[in-house]
Image: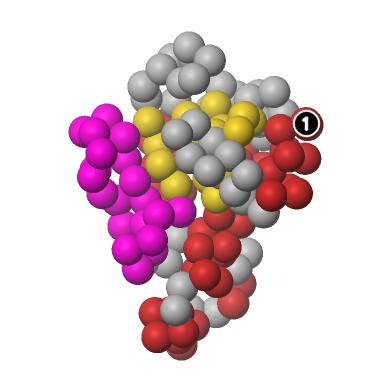
Amino acid sequence: MDYNTTRDYLLSRPEAAEDFPFYPDVAVFKICGKMFATLSMDKAENGSAAPHMNLKCDPQEAQMLRDIFPAVKAGYHMNKRHWNTVILDGSVPEGEVQRMIDRSYGLVVKGLTRKQRQPLELRYSPEELYR
C-alpha cells in the first residue's frame, strides 16, 4: 500500500479523524480522541524513505508479526510492547496491512469508556467496529 491508499483506508474506519498534533508530516488517526495509528513519510528508524505507520497491537500478535514480516518492527517512539511500526515498502500484503489497521482500530474502540463506545456500537455493526 502506498501513502495515499493507506491514508484513505485509515479514514474509512467509522468516525476516524486525522490530526497533526506532533509534526506537520506525521498524520495521527484517532477515534473519539484516542490514537489508533500514525502515518508518515519521514525516514523510519531503519533509514527507509518508504511511508510507515504505527499501529496498536496485542503484545503476542505484535511479536508474531515482527517475526513473520521484516517490514514490521517494534513501535518507533511508542510502547514497543503494544505498538508496531509497519514500513509500507510493498513487502507486507495489502490485505495484511488492512487487517492490522482494523485490529488497531478495534483494540482502541474496545478500550474506550462505555460512554464513548456505546454511541459507536449503536451507529455501527460489530463487523464495522471490530473487524
* Residue 30 visible here: yes
Q: On the rendered image, what quadrant is the C terminus found in?
A: bottom right
* Residue 129 visible here: no
Where residue 104 appears, as percent x and y from the top left, is 55, 54
Number of labelled discs?
A: 1
Residue at 37%, 57% (x, y): give it: 30
Who is closer to the viewer here, 126 or 85? 85
Q: Report if residue 31 lies within the magenta region.
A: yes
Where residue 74 appears, as percent x and y from the top left, is 60, 33
Who is closer to the viewer here, 60 or 25? 60
Crowdedness near tag 1: few (<14), some (14–19) or many (≥20) residues, C-alpha within 10 Å: few
Where residue 107 appears, as percent x and y from the top left, is 57, 63
Where residue 123 appears, as percent x and y from the top left, is 43, 83
Residue at 78%, 31% (x, y): give it: 68
Callout 1 amino acid: Asp
Who is closer to the viewer here, 90 or 58? 58
Q: Which colour scheme is used?
A: secondary structure
Residue at 35%, 68% (x, y): give it: 32
Q: Which segment is the magenta one?
A: 16-36
Going by the image, does 85 lie left or right of 19? right
Residue 90 vs 29, above or below: the answer is: above
Who is closer to the viewer here, 6 or 25? 25
**SS for dot 1:** helix
Residue at 32%, 63% (x, y): give it: 33
Going by the image, does 32 lie left or right of 106? left
- Residue for badge 1: 67
Q: Report if residue 85 lies within the magenta region.
A: no
Q: Quadrant of residue 97?
A: top right
Residue 80 vs 108, above or below: the answer is: above
